[in-house]
Image (tube, rainbow, N blue to C red):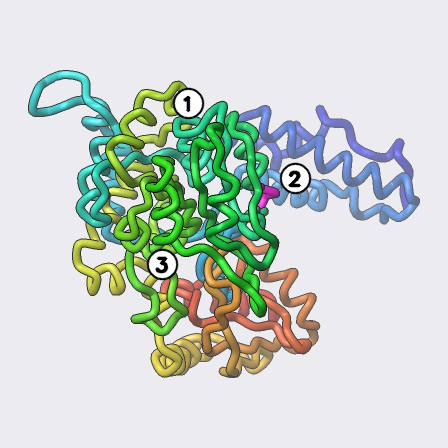
Amino acid sequence: MTSLKNLPKVDKILEWNGVRLMLAMHPRPVVLKAVRSVLDALRAVALKDELPADALAEAAVVARVEAELAALSAPHLRRVVNGAGVVVHTNLGRSPLPEEVRQALDDVAFGYSNLEFDLEKGERGSRYSHVEGILCELTGAEAALVVNNNAAAVLLALSSLAAGKEAIVSRGELVEIGGSFRIPDVMRQSGVALREVGTTNRTHPRDYRGAITPETGLLLKVHCSNFAVVGFTAEVSMTEMVVIGRESSIPVMADAGSGNLIDLSQIGLAYEPTVQDYLKAGVDVVTFSGDKLLGGPQAGLIVGSRKCIEPMKKHPLLRALRIDKLTLAALEGTLRLYRDERAALRSIPTLRMLAASEEEITNRGRRFLRRLRAGLSEAVSLELVKGTSQVGGGALPLQNIPTRLISVRVAGLTPQELEGRLRQREIPVIGRIQKDLFLLDLRTLFDRDIPVLTEAFREVAK
């Protein structure tokens, strides 16, 4: 064991050959931070009288500084392998973008663009015009607007439509979703007074009609997102709400949550109203996310009547909520794929993963295992087992999709140890543990993940 007085000084470490090489390749402040971090860690161990003398040898300290420097130099936001089986995984970046938008992102990111320049008129234009036309084309809306996420879309719409007035909403739709985002809180921030009607499980048309007063500015319907009320229930349909709104000349707004432009029942999932369904029912304004079931970048999309949306374009909040050029490029490219539903289902990763059949997943899993096993020792055991995937992103919370999982066993490691080691790699591998097995869901794995997984399994098996 050694004491604190034996710890080398910072200046001495900086003179060591190994560290001098690091200084030649990295900024001095970063190397200095790595050295101090290593010394802090060694000091903490020495205070517990648990530091062996050889830990202070030059080679040992240099190795620790090198490892710390590598960690400091690596991007904090980086790629991960999603084997968790949640397709729209909020913690893992939600929806992967289609390959078809890569070139558009490259062009816009590394050069100039006509972000706010009207090329026909040769004068300043609007950034929102790049996607308004195609959103109206796809949804049938009269007008459209895009902000940075759906919470922002709801905030802007409420502030524009009903500030200083009341918005009537069913008590069963006062949801809280991830990140403690609560509809009542957003309503307060927008200057709209909440008027609850009905009960948690049952709300009727008479509840809305009975709550309308001269102070009512909006009827609001909110998608229940990541929970479902089942059993003895009743809710007011979109069509019924529109009728009630028309009777009193009050606009009707729907927060569709994830939002989808394709009927998901055609790919074997439970039916979810499409954005087009809301508009066909007569809803004046619909807000929804761009990065969930739509399969695009993070964005909040607002579509509906021109009368309701045009004032939003002039609202002071819009500048604070606007999206950047990269989001617009990714969103436009994703939306263009929806002009052909078959192309969308084939090209948009979120839809492709959700649409994959159990048979397709099984056949792919067999090919996946053959390629993985070819590069691994007998210390790694891989087996194909049955399981279920989830949609994620607050969509279809009751939907379990049949899938195939890769059960991974590594000699000498518990599932918990294996999970931890894979999660700490340069390209982290994220899976799940069930019934004392470490599992990777094939539904959310890409073929490009195979070399990463092969290397990861090989390393943890050493």
The residue at the point 56 percent across, 67 percent down is: 230
Q: Name the secondary structure under disc 3.
A: loop
Of label 3 and label 2, which has the lower sequence position?
Answer: 2
Occupied quadrant, residue 435: bottom right
Q: Position of residue 334 (x, y in %)?
A: 26, 49
Residue 126 higher or lower than 240, as above or below: above
Residue 62 higher or lower than 391, as above or below: above
Q: Which residue in the protein does label 1 denote?
A: 317
For the residues labelled 2 and 1, the Cα–Cα distance comes to 47 Å
Question: Marks 1 and 3: which is nearer the front?
Answer: 3
For badge 1, the amino acid type reads Leu
Q: Position of residue 124 (x, y in %)?
A: 18, 17
Question: Marks 3 and 2: which is nearer the front?
Answer: 3
Region in magenta? 177-182
> Where residue 65 is drawn, which disc sits there?
2
The residue at the point 38 percent across, 24 percent down is: 318
Drawn side of residue 154 relative to residue 412, left or right: left
Q: Position of residue 53 (x, y in %)?
A: 85, 46
Q: Nearer the viewer, residue 160 or 447?
A: 160
Q: Name the secondary structure under disc 2.
A: helix
Count the labels in the image. 3
Q: Name the secondary structure under disc 1.
A: helix
For badge 3, the amino acid type reads Pro
For badge 2, the amino acid type reads Val
Drawn side of residue 433 relative to residue 98, left or right: right
